[in-house]
Amino acid sequence: RQRPRPRSATRLHRRAMCGIVAYLGPSTAKDVMLAGLARLEYRGYDSAGVACVEAVPPAAASANGPPSVKRRSSSGPSHTIGVVKAAGKVSVLASRSSSSLNTGTVGIAHTRWATHGAPTDANAHPHTSSDGGLAIVHNGIVENFVALREELQRKGYRMASETDTELIAHLISDVRKQKWMPLEEAVRQALSQVQGAYGICVISSEEPDLLVGARKGSPLLLGIGEDEYLLASDASAVIERTRRVTYLNDGEMVVVARTPSGACTYEIKTLENIKLCREVEELQLKLEDIQKGSFKHFMLKEICEQPEVLENAMRGRVTNRHSAGSRESGSGCNDVLLGGLSEHWPALAAAPRIIVVACGTSHHAGLIGEYLLENLARMPCEVEYASEFRYRNPILCREDVLIAISQSGETADTLAALQLARAAGCLCLGICNTVGSSIARETDGGVYLHAGPEIGVASTKAFSAQLVALTLIALKLGKERETLSPEELSANLGAMLALPDQLRCVLEQKGTVYEMAKVFKYASNFLFLGRGYHYPVALEGALKLKEISYIHAEGYPAAEMKHGPIALIDQFMPVVIIAPTSDPNYRKLVSNIEEVRARGGSVIAITEEDNHELDAQCEYVMRVPSTADFLMPLLCVAPLQLMAYYIADMRQCNVDQPRNLAKSVTVE
């Protein structure tokens, strides 16, 4: 097989989970950027800041402040950079900046997740050069931080913060001090000294109508509006202003400028100063997709959206060559169409193994995918934590196929694992939710989830969409490898098409789950048990609960209960057991329930709606409709998501933004 040459991607460095918004246009920059930062809050952060270039009245320019803080452009009045920063939420920043920065139309803003230095006002971005004439925001980590800091300190620069970002501001300033040059060139030369990852935006009081951005390993896009431009790390920050965007690739920079006539223009170049022509894309994102509507939290909204998510994930991908009426019963649904994989099915079917790399919830989806691929397609599959895979010198051959799963498409470890496999010549595929993300661009093909924006930090609907994608891949491979008969394929696809309505029935039990949550909201520990397809569901249920309620929870294979966890069981230990009768090991799960009961534990069971055998043995039974065993995880996970949500809400936790967590984990 002819393999494309691996991209010359740099080694993926640690990257901070931060948000960037920058603006140049006719509107008040501060207001535009604060609105953008509010859209980025879901990513997780601990401080925020904003900086704007503002004109200084002639009298003030001559009377106030040290001369070095103000700069004069070649054809206009003196300008200064105003900076406001705050530890805490964007609302604190908005309040603190309410009486300032009200005239500038060029600016940069940031939400920071602490890596170098504590979450304080001083460490919040933007950071400025020593003379205050230049400001920068930065996502990423400078790996040669210590060496650069020592060199700058030898030159007399004093650090006002503990961050690595401040060093870049001083580097740019130092380059210009040695020989004055335009901001664009100074940024280019300074970045040549930086080892690590960055997405940056820079403004200068000397060139007040200029905004410079650059990317290496950390996402950055350009939003193109009506005579205005925005730079951002996430499309949700620009959707209120424009749907037209273009994405920067690694090693590229963008220069946005306002001409003397007032018109705004932009140029995209490489860091070697080669001009590029870049396609402008239309965002499919809708503003209402990133609003809560009538729901109390985004997480609850996203749980309840899952029936529609399943429909969207399957729409146009299950072909029916017979009548539309036959689709209702599932007959005649006899093929899977995944456009992003259409040219790769022969390689997939012939591969000696499939390797799935992912982190967190995506890893749990991958574990279910392993069962799906092995059971339905008889395809050898290994599922790896991307963070372990990238560092353990794995044995790879060119015929292997690697599938990278990531909701955001930007997960640092998953990207690094993908790049490792590309370097080995493997066919690399992606399953992600974000169009234009790094994984989407760096893979040979893949599947978009079409789940819509997921704002809640704890993933729910993306997990379900990942399971749909993996199930469709497994069924298609079952057809290609002739491990499924046409009749079996058609029946299985028909069962999939029934899932959205079945999931709606599950979600109608929200009231029952709510009442159950009242009983267990003060529990200190939970144990989740499952077998086969439902062991990863147990892991996911435990993860959801610990993520948002801060209750310690563990997921285990039910058969492993006797190998340690049973020692923890007493009257204060609720145990959730996923026990559908479709599980071949159902009777063994019933034995697990009896063992928990014998030790005084409380049992919460999930089983089919027509199974009442467990009623007398369990404190609570959550019921789901009957379906094929390999599809049952898509129904069983919803009650666990609801239980975690209601318990967290009753404990007055921040459900959408749990402590210490961020939506896009882009740091090792």
Image: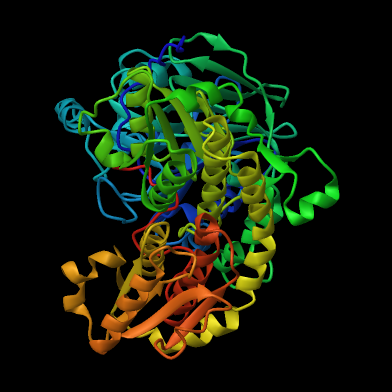
Residue 635 horizontal/vertical position (percent): 55, 64
Up/down of 230 relative to 422, above or below: below
- The answer to which quarter of the image holds residue 350 is top left
Residue 428 horizontal/vertical position (percent): 44, 26
Could you tell me which residue is drawn at 64 percent across and 76 percent down? 508
Q: Nearer the viewer, residue 298 or 129?
A: 298
Could you tell me which residue is drawn at 35 percent across and 12 percent down? 179
**Residue 584 seen in this snapshot:** yes
Could you tell me which residue is drawn at 59 percent across and 41 percent down? 235
Coloring scheme used:
rainbow
Q: Nearer the viewer, residue 554 or 102?
A: 554
Q: Nearer the viewer, residue 156 or 587?
A: 587
Left or right of 99? Residue 567 is left
Figure disc tally: 0
Left or right of 426? Residue 100 is right
Quadrant of the snapshot with the C terminus: top left
Residue 160 horizontal/vertical position (percent): 26, 44
**Residue 56 seen in this snapshot:** no
Up/down of 50 relative to 446, above or below: below
Residue 243 horizontal/vertical position (percent): 70, 38
Left or right of 546? Residue 185 is right
Q: Nearer the viewer, residue 202 or 177?
A: 202
